[in-house]
Amino acid sequence: MEKIKIGIIREGKVPPDHRVPLTPKQCKSIQAIYPNVEIVVQPSPIRAYKDEEYAAEGMKLNEDLSSCDIIMGVKEVNISDLIPNKKFLFFSHTLKKQPYNRDLLRAILEKKIQLIDYETIKNKQNKRVIGFGRYAGIVGAYNGFRAMGLKTGLFEIKPANKCADRKEMEAEMSKIVLPDNTKIVLTGFGRVGHGAREIIDILPIKEVTPDEFMKNKFNEPVFTHLEVEDYYGRKDGKPFDKSEFYSNPELYKSTFTRFLPEMDMYIPCHFWSNRSPFIITREDLKNENLRLSVVADISCDIDGPVACTIRPSKIADPIYGYDPISETEVDFKTEGSIAVMAVDNLPCELPLDASEDFGNELMRHVLPALLKEDPDNMIGRASETTTDGQLTEYYSYLQDYVDGKE
């Protein structure tokens, strides 16, 4: 059986990312499941899991990964750390032709590296099988309740990144006090939306239908989880058609404004296409009956579908205010402002738990195709580049981006 050596690279992006693609115990399990696999870990002073923890599970620590066949990281690998003629797995953030990573993709091609981007790894139903979305939802929803406590002055909970792990974070939630008839709206049913629901479900918050949410007052906190047809409608008044909406979103308009006078907090976890209409416009937020006071924007599309999300925020300073009248940023405690939480790297706040969750998906869905048989060509379809220094047929659309023509 052919020997395969996997390297876990040190994260080099600034600001530092403490996550890992595989935990120490997962590395040990992989070597037990695949006896022909050896895992080497590049030492790092910043990982949530320490070098000693990897060594304790029998992993070799080595600064030099040049003997490895496959190299795994989390975020973009520094150009100086790329090793020619290898397979690399990481989030490259090049698929949407991000200008800041053009040189990275050029270097990958020049060094004849096979780039397998986690974001592109999909099953035969064309659905993503791996990602940090669940923990984005978990941390983002928690941050939203923290913002609500700070905005109202009713309670205060510790920032997620100051908690040792998810268990401590959830223990903080016992301090959350929500008044009767607190009303919360959640959108999105993917990994992110379901992650957010894991947090909502811990709290004594009752789920109600959109119709009940709009018509009733409650003697307890409530939330409603909206389907896309609940907040988009045909411009011509014809019945909503989900498949048509996704293929021709320009035929639709947002109907979300009807919820604004009834909701205290909005947690957007949806996927939004730039072909789709905005969900909440700046004009919508000028409504004199506006009740909305907190937005935990986990989707974090800047200056887009949720008008008050005018910039991303950082873990160290996660909340800013948006004044609907002046359309400017203000202190989030300013009367009449909307407190916006728009941290764009939420899973980094719980690196231990997020890494373990990610590694479990990697082991379950990706490693069998990467290390054994790949009948659905999952790895081939996820490879942006080849070891011949070319873009694959699936990503040939990036050629103009590489050439600097767009």
Image (cartoon, grey):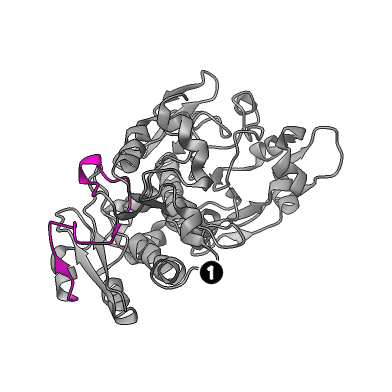
- Label 1 SS: loop
Q: Which residue is mark 1?
A: 375
Work out which quarter of the rendered image holds the N terminus and state it: bottom left
The magenta span reads: 57-83
- Residue located at (50% from left, 61% from top): 378
Residue 240, image x, y percentages? 80, 45
78 in magenta: yes
- Membership of 66 in magenta stretch: yes
Residue at 80% across, 32% down: 235
* Picture residue at 67% right of the left edge, 40% below the top: 259
* Outermost residue, front side: 388
Specify the farthest residue to the top.
Answer: 326
Asked whether residue 153 is in view, the answer is: yes
Image location (x, y in percent) of residue 354: 36, 60
**Drawn side of residue 51 relative to residue 100, left or right:** left
Front-most of 108 and 280?
108
**Rendered position, 301 above or below 113:** above
